[in-house]
Image: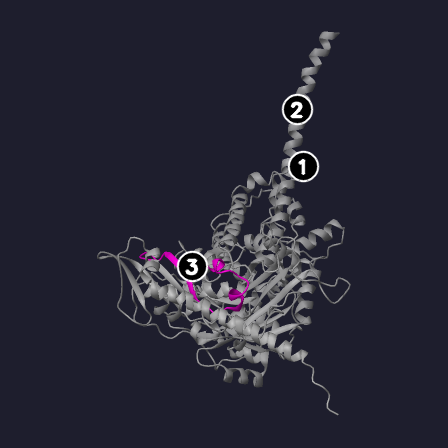
């Protein structure tokens, strides 16, 4: 028996068909109307960009660039973006805009002339497009323009199209890229990148590296956001107080405070890609890439998905994009591969992983710094939303790429890469230099400051916390003996300042240490600017507060242990002459990388070693610094040229007075009272005692004589007065 066929599904199908047909026809009329406007009344439209112009001429067909003239005077340029930057939008087709530039590269007009965006054809009025485009008027082609809220130094913000964030991002990318090409072609700005050959990845260079190693040398970078960080970014906007995503607080496996913990890297590099993907998966990926393509891996945990739940085939990923040299790079579905398996040793589990392809037309340079931009949107209404951006920086380590020889030198005003890095870290540089200036003032006027021991002790604790938190964990500017070995090898071979200028915080601290070595000796770095040393010192101070008994080696053992760090330094230097990379691995005797750079996120043996040294400092102040630190030993050598001796001593010091020697927890004061500047950490405790009339025996004697004389004089004065009364 044949069942009757229901007509309801057919009616539903017809309804959908006619709805899509109407939308399609509507989109055609929308596009055609704009095209007709340009073709039928071109002069009127061009004149709205340059009102004083009386003629518009072009000398080429593709791309067609019109020149606006007032008589024979050139006023500027008018062009359509489609022939210059045909960037696919959400519909898969580019958005075309009519742009105007004056002779200084300032945009004088911007109008969307053609698009196929479904969200812009239905539900969002054409006026919203004009409002968005008008924001570019007055902006320069040299401006780095960012859509959305969230202030970032060096960027100009513009408001997004309400309900069409992705389309706004594509329009911004289109305008920036097309306008820059015209400005370069017409000589308004110089194409600095034309003089630089694009970097080439060293495909034959591979070494086995685990996950902590990839993190340690910057091959993999991290963008970590807490929910509170995102909330602060929306303060003052319509999105303030709106929850981005829900979280089940009863689920013990979910951290409701962690918004996203995102790791990202460049997979083309064999030492990165093969270690993460494994050989077979890496070879497959390289075969999928066309010449000039690059693969970026994203791996994350947290409440926020970088892919987004609203992503569908044929669309654009609206939560992530890259930026390099002012070029904005977005990703479509064809640029995406699912990443299921990773193989790097000691790698954590991730709830979300993906591979995105940067296509060759984006002219991506793997040797130049780039930024990963994470866009976070908050819905404020059915169609309304606001969003902000968070940025993560990436610079591929130099050992993984080479740059072909540049063309013959041409005079250029191109800005060196290190200058841009210094500008990006301006606020950190200001904070660090201010702190170093304050420390310098304290050291220069130490004779005055030590007379206020309570103030000095509090300052020292505060500065130690600053050293740990800011210099150590925030800026990762912990110096290492590896820096010393690299510097020595640079002097022996090819020295380039640019190599050391790439990390401004490290460079500034090294410069300051070099200065203080000549003025005060080794102790300024070891006593004030070493994060790991500061941790040991604060731990020992807490131990003293809780009356934990200290344990010291006998003098004979102590003196021989002091030589150990010099032996370690000489051994590392000797090995570096044969293999600097091998010496860098052996330099793991320094716990700095584990404790500071990687925040103890390493193999258990490294963590036990670093924690063990900290535990020893509970009963023996700065044990590692005194006996094992090769960096401290390296600083002693130039410290021999110390120009001044700021630490005051008296003839009674050591003969017979031993107060300072007994109080020096670093044991840098010999029994004869002489301060061993090779071991001194410049804590100034001995100088506090030196000026203390109640502690320093010579001063105590003087004070007692003075007080006794005062008593005698007072008695003589009072005695006659008593006689008069009688």
- How is this picture coloured? one colour
* In-front residue for pair 523/553: 523
Q: Which label was assigned to residue 710?
A: 2
The residues tagged by marks 2 and 1 sit, at their Cα atoms, a distance apart of: 17 Å
Residue 317 figure quarter: bottom right
618 lies above or below 28: above
Mark positioned earlier in the residue sequence (3 or 1):
3
User: What residue did someone put label 3 on?
Assistant: 419
Q: What element carries label 1?
A: loop
Instruction: Give the residue at x 55% y 42%.
Output: 446
Q: Position of residue 556 (x, y in %)?
A: 66, 60
Number of marks present in the image shown: 3
- Quarter of the picture containing the N terminus is bottom right
Magenta highlight on residue 77: no
Q: What element carries label 3?
A: helix
* In-front residue for pair 633/269: 269
Q: Is residue 287 left or right of residue 109?
A: right
Mark positioned earlier in the residue sequence (2 or 1):
1
- Quarter of the picture containing the C terminus is top right
User: What residue did someone put label 1 on?
Assistant: 694
Stretch in magenta:
102-129
Q: Position of residue 653 (x, y in %)?
A: 61, 44
- The answer to whether residue 29 shows anywhere in this view is yes
Q: Where is residue 694 in the image (x, y as percent from the top left)?
A: 67, 37
Looking at the rendered image, the disc whose residue lies closer to the viewer, 2 or 3, is: 3
Q: Which label was assigned to residue 37?
A: none
Q: Is mark 2 on a helix, strand or loop?
A: helix
Mark positioned earlier in the residue sequence (2 or 3):
3
- The answer to whether residue 669 shows anywhere in this view is no
* In-front residue for pair 642/391: 391
């Amino acid at each position: 028996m044949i069942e009757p066929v229901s007509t309801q599904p057919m009616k539903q199908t017809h309804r959908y068909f006619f709805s899509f047909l109407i939308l399609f026809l509507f989109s055609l009329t929308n596009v055609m109307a704009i095209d007709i406007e340009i073709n039928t009344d071109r002069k009127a439209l061009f004149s709205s960009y340059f009102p004083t112009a009386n003629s518009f001429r072009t000398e080429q067909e593709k791309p067609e660039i019109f020149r606006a003239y007032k008589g024979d005077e050139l006023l500027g340029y008018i062009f359509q973006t489609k022939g210059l930057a045909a960037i696919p939008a959400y519909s898969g087709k580019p958005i075309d805009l009519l742009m105007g530039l004056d002779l200084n590269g300032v945009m004088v007009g911007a109008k969307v002339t053609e698009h196929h965006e479904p969200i812009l054809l239905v539900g969002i009025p054409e006026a919203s497009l004009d409002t968005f485009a008008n924001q570019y008027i007055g902006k320069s082609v040299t401006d780095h323009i960012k859509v959305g809220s969230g202030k970032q130094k060096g960027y100009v913000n513009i408001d997004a199209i309400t309900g069409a964030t992705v389309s706004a991002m594509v329009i911004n990318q289109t305008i920036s890229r097309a306008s820059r090409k015209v400005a370069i072609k017409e000589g308004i700005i110089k194409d600095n990148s034309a003089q630089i050959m694009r970097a080439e990845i060293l495909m034959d260079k591979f070494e086995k590296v685990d996950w902590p190693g990839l993190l340690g040398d910057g091959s993999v970078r991290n963008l970590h956001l807490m929910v509170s960080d995102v909330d602060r970014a929306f303060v003052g906007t319509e999105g303030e107080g709106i929850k981005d995503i829900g979280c089940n607080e009863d689920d013990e496996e979910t951290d409701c405070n962690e918004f996203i913990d995102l790791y990202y890297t460049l997979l083309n590099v064999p030492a990165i890609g093969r270690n993460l993907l494994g050989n077979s998966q890496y070879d497959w990926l390289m075969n999928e890439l066309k010449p000039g393509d690059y693969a970026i891996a994203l791996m994350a945990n947290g409440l926020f998905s970088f892919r987004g739940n609203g992503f569908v085939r044929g669309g654009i990923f609206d939560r992530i994009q890259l930026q390099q040299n002012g070029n904005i790079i977005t990703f479509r579905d064809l640029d995406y591969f699912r990443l299921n398996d990773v193989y790097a040793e000691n790698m954590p589990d991730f709830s979300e992983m993906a591979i995105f392809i940067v296509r060759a037309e984006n002219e991506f340079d793997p040797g130049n710094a780039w930024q990963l931009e994470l866009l976070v949107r908050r819905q404020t209404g059915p169609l309304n939303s606001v969003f902000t951006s968070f940025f993560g920086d990436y610079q591929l380590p130099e050992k993984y790429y080479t740059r072909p020889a540049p063309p013959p030198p041409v005079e250029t005003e191109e800005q060196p890469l290190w200058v841009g890095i210094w500008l990006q870290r301006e606020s950190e540089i200001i904070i660090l230099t201010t702190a170093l200036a304050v420390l310098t003032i304290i050291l220069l006027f130490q004779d005055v400051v030590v007379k206020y021991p309570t103030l000095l002790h509090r300052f020292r604790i505060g500065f130690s916390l600053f050293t740990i938190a800011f210099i150590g964990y925030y800026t990762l500017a912990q110096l290492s003996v590896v820096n010393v070995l690299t510097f020595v090898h640079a002097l022996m071979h090819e020295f380039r300042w640019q190599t050391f200028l790439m990390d401004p915080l490290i460079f500034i601290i090294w410069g300051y240490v070099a200065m203080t070595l000549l003025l005060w000796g080794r102790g300024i770095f070891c006593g004030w600017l070493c994060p790991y040393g500061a941790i040991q010192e604060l731990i020992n101070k807490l131990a003293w507060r809780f009356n934990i008994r200290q344990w010291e080696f006998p003098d004979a053992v102590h003196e021989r242990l002091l030589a150990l760090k010099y032996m370690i330094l000489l051994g590392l230097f000797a090995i570096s002459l044969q293999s600097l990379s091998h010496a860098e691995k052996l330099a793991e005797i320094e716990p700095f990388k584990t404790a500071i750079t990687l925040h103890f996120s390493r193999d258990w043996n490294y963590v036990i070693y670093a924690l063990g040294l900290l535990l020893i400092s509970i009963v023996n102040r700065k044990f590692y610094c005194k006996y094992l630190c090769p960096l401290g030993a390296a600083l002693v050598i130039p410290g021999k040229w110390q120009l001044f001796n700021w630490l005051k001593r008296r003839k009674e010091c050591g003969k017979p007075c031993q107060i300072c020697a007994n109080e020096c927890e670093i044991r840098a004061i010999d029994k004869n009272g002489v301060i061993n500047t090779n071991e001194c950490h410049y804590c100034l405790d001995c100088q506090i005692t030196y000026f203390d009339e109640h502690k320093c025996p010579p001063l105590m004697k003087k004070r007692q004589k003075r007080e006794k004389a005062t008593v005698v004089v007072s008695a003589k004065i009072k005695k006659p007065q008593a006689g008069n009364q009688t």
